[in-house]
Image (cartoon, coloured by chain):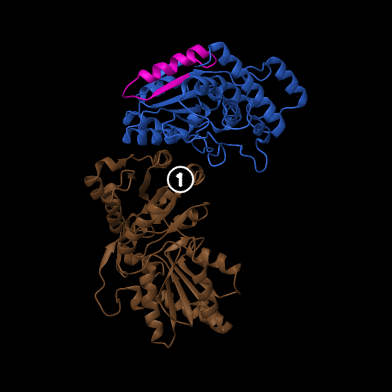
Chain colours: A blue, B brown
């Protein structure tokens, strides 16, 4: 039984708190882009994806590729809370010998479907997995979460062409459109807009949603399921640092270090 | 060396063939045997040697277009879902343009992706310096978990292709588009990581790979007339290097020449020097290759001469290391002056 939307919202808040606790403990890590992605990850892992935490390498599972690999705190917290490994592992994030490396490493962490790190590379991987599935008559889906800053990378657009050309309708890419990157607004650095039009021109089916509305996210994934012969992009409008007022829409919270004081203040906002 | 099943290059007409052809025969062999391979190409099937494979196994062939970076990432995805991948592209496009993806997705994930650098070394010939890959072996060798193989001829290229399919992690195999002498046969042993001693000798050793094995054998023959016994080793696997054979050559012959159709920085010569510097006693080494410069247009055999990659150059290098082995500094300086 899938959780209700209200239960999903509670899970998302718990993951947000985990993100803050683990990054306070590690003294580093990317908070802003993790918080913008939490609602999307929650719907994927608790409502949408066919997965089995007890069998992380189950052949017919839906796959997930975190192309915006710096959002690893959010993914690790989701995997731990979903039962892939002990929640206490979260406190080892970014530390020596941890199973939770700064960026996802499939050889160390149960539940990670692909090692990622260098920006702009996830969609190609998702496409390859989907192609193999098609060849083998498998019906699982492949989800790929991208950051908008990554869309500067040329490989993203090579992969966008490949997915459309091969009609990879099992690929569902998600654009975490928080409008921010490390150095500031994506539109000030090198403008991405009109980003939705770009994907449509590349022959993708695009669904635009509020990336913090559980119901809208659920509807978008259901729509993606029904599209045949084309890949789908869920264009999720999000807020960098979502849930913590002093972090919201502040590019410095891309990778700023938390202090104890700020942590307490942030946790109050997330109760 | 009858047990090596080598062609007698000194007494018979030596046939030539591009090593790309052996690669393609290996791919066809794998597909015919039902191995679940996928061959990927970036708009080079016509020239890189996979055209026939594409015709015969269209369902196992994927032309990704001029998207080398996306090709490497897609290959990673296919490998994650259980496929055995062979990627063909120009050596310099694989090793240069797509290196980050090879590193961050394929090698970091230890995935079963075999990357085949076609038209490598000087074999892109007339295309000139921008298209000749002289650095590929060096940059691929630095990647953790990557196996690097440089086959000497088309026969060995097929064996290397079959062997690569059995290695679970990533492999880089380097092929030539130009015709090169066929010096091995189906009987010649080939095991990844085990160099082949093709000629015995105790005065010096030439460690070579690719087309330079043929040149090394000719050089050794020339030096025999001067009363020198020169060992010739086919070091087809640059990584993992056969340290046992390299160390033995150093201890038993005391003077080494490496020969490769690539940069003198970081390739076979670099691998041998690194290995020896940290194991056996200091041994004079001379690295024959292309010295810190780009290639240029010309026919392949002209370029080998132009860049000093012939039997004559290797023989000169052997005389030079022998001078150092025997401590004749005057000779060293005279050779250095040319």
**Is residue A270 rendered magenta in the image?**
no
Give the residue drawn at x 34%, y 59%: B176
Residue B314: tell me if it is visible: yes
Q: Is residue A56 above or below residue B314?
A: above
Viewer-side residue, B233 vs B313: B233
Q: Is residue A205 left or right of residue B278?
A: left
- x and y percentages locating residue B48 in the rendered image: 30, 51
Q: Seen from this angle, which residue lies furthest right?
A: A261
Segment colored magenta = A209-235
Which chain does tag 1 point to?
B
Q: Is residue B108 above or below residue A188?
A: below
Residue A27: tell me if it is visible: no
**Is residue A234 rendered magenta in the image?**
yes
Viewer-side residue, B190 vs A147: B190
Mark 1 packing: few (<14 Cα in 10 Å), some, or many (20+)?
many
For disc 1, the marked residue is B111
Q: Seen from this angle, which residue lies furthest left?
A: B55
């Amino acid at each position: 039984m899938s959780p209700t939307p209200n239960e999903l919202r509670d899970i998302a808040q718990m993951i947000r708190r985990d993100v803050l606790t683990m990054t306070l403990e590690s003294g580093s890590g990317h908070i802003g882009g993790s918080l913008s992605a939490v609602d999307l990850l929650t719907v994927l892992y608790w409502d949408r994806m066919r997965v089995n935490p007890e069998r992380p390498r189950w052949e017919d599972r839906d796959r997930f590729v975190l192309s915006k690999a710096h959002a690893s705190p959010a993914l690790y917290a989701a995997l731990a809370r979903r039962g892939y490994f002990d929640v206490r592992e979260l406190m080892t994030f970014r530390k020596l010998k941890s199973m939770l490396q700064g960026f996802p490493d499939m050889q160390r962490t149960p539940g990670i479907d692909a090692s990622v790190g260098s920006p702009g590379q996830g969609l190609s991987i998702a496409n390859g997995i989907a192609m193999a599935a098609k060849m083998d008559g498998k019906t699982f889906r492949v989800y790929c979460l991208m950051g908008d800053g990554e869309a500067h990378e040329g490989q993203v657009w090579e992969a966008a062409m490949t997915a459309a050309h091969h009609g990879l309708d099992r690929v569902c890419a998600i654009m975490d459109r928080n409008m921010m990157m490390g150095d500031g607004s994506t539109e000030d650095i090198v403008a991405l807009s009109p980003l939705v039009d770009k994907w449509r021109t590349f022959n993708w089916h695009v669904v635009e949603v509020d990336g913090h509305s559980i119901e809208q996210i659920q509807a978008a994934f259901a729509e993606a399921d029904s599209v045949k012969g084309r890949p789908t992009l869920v264009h999720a409008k999000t807020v960098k640092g979502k849930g913590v007022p002093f972090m919201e829409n502040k590019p410095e919270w891309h990778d700023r270090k938390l202090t104890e004081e700020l942590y307490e203040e942030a946790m109050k906002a997330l109760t | 060396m009858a047990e090596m099943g080598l062609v007698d290059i000194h007494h018979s007409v030596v046939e030539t063939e591009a090593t790309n052809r052996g690669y393609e025969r290996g791919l066809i062999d794998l597909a015919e045997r039902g191995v679940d391979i996928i061959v990927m190409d970036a708009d080079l099937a016509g020239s890189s040697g996979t055209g026939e494979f594409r015709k015969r196994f269209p369902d196992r062939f994927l032309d990704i277009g001029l998207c080398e970076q996306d090709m490497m990432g897609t290959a990673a995805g296919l490998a994650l879902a259980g496929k055995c991948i062979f990627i063909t592209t120009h050596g310099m496009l694989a090793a240069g343009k797509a290196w980050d993806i090879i590193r961050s997705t394929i090698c970091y994930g230890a995935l079963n992706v075999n990357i085949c650098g076609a038209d490598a070394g000087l074999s892109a010939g007339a295309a000139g310096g921008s298209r000749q890959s002289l650095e590929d072996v060096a940059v691929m060798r630095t990647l953790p978990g990557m196996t690097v193989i440089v086959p000497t001829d088309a026969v060995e290229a097929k064996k290397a292709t079959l062997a690569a399919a059995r290695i679970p992690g990533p492999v880089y195999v380097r092929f030539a588009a130009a015709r090169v002498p066929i010096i091995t046969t189906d009987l010649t042993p080939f095991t990844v990581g085990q160099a082949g001693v093709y000629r015995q000798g105790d005065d010096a050793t030439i460690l070579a790979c690719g087309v330079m094995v043929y040149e090394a054998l000719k050089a050794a023959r020339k030096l025999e007339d001067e009363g020198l016994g020169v060992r010739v080793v086919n070091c087809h696997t640059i990584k993992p290097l056969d340290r046992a054979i390299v160390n033995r050559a150093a201890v038993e012959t005391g003077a080494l020449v490496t020969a490769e159709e690539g940069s003198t920085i970081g390739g076979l010569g670099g691998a041998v020097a690194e290995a020896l510097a940290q194991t056996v006693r200091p041994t004079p080494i001379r690295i024959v290759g292309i010295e810190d410069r780009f290639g240029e247009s010309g026919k392949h055999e002209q370029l080998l001469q132009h860049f000093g990659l012939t039997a004559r150059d290797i023989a000169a290098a052997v005389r030079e290391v022998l001078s150092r082995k025997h401590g004749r500094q005057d000779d060293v300086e005279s050779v250095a002056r040319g």
